């Protein structure tokens, strides 16, 4: 947004009035930008996260867009979404998660029973079917969607500002 200001008390008063108007609108504009970023994050997650499908016996979750204090959050909820995000039974050094601190904060360990390449059998709690697994490398849908959304933030904010000020 560009404004031309001619020196003179009338132009300065008009400019001050315009600035006050913009300042008054900013909370709504910021809220709109946050909502747009959240919606894009939800779309990005929906494009990469399994929703209810079976991946090596692990079922995807549900995606929600919720208001939280001071903003919005996109969540991927489900009993087994941690397995889809981080993997199952794979030794950490052969399948590192991009942010290894997340694993330690969640008290998550790979291949805790040292099954290694022998694999293991387990019963699918929904279908009762028995499956064999050699472990699954993490799909990282939440991580991938968040990184993509992070790259899109400047474009989203520009779009919102153009809508509000043009």
Image (tube, rainbow, N blue to C red):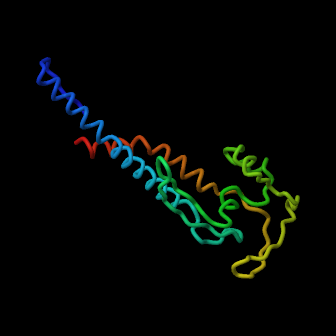
Q: Vertical placement of 3 versus 109: above or below?
A: above
x and y percentages locating residue 89 in the rendered image: 79, 59
Name the quadrant containing residue 76.
bottom right
For image coordinates 85% across by 61% down, the residue present is 117
Q: Where is residue 133 in the image (x, y as percent from the top left)?
A: 78, 68
Question: Which quadrant is the N terminus positioned in?
Answer: top left
User: Which is nearer the eye, 50 or 38?
Assistant: 38
Image side of residue 138 versus residue 27, left or right: right
Tell which of 79 and 141 is nearer to you.
Answer: 79
Q: Position of residue 51 (x, y in %)?
A: 57, 68
**In the image: residue 129, left or right of residue 2:** right
Residue 31 horizontal/vertical position (percent): 38, 48
Q: Who is closer to the viewer here, 164 or 70? A: 70
Quadrant (top left, top right, bottom left, bottom right) of the C terminus: top left
Residue 39, image quadrant: bottom left
Q: In this view, does 13 lie to the left or right of 82?
A: left
Identify the residue shown where x is 35% and y is 43%. 27
Q: Hey, which quadrant is residue 122 in on the image?
A: bottom right
Q: Is residue 51 left or right of residue 42?
A: right
């Amino acid at each position: 947004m560009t404004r031309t200001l001619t020196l003179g008390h009338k132009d300065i008063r008009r400019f001050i009035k315009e600035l006050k108007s913009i300042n008054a609108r900013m909370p709504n504009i910021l809220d709109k930008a946050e909502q747009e970023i959240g919606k894009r994050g939800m779309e990005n997650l929906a494009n990469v996260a399994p929703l209810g499908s079976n991946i090596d016996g692990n079922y995807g979750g549900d995606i929600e867009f919720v208001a939280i204090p001071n903003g919005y959050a996109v969540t991927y909820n489900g009993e087994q979404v941690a397995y889809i995000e981080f993997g199952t039974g794979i030794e950490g050094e052969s399948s590192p998660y991009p942010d290894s601190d997340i694993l330690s904060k969640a008290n998550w360990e790979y291949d805790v029973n040292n099954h290694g390449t022998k694999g293991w059998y387990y019963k699918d709690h929904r279908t009762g079917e028995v499956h064999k697994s050699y472990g699954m490398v993490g799909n990282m849908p939440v991580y991938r969607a968040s990184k993509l959304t992070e790259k899109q933030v400047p474009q989203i904010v520009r779009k919102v500002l153009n809508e509000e000020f043009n």
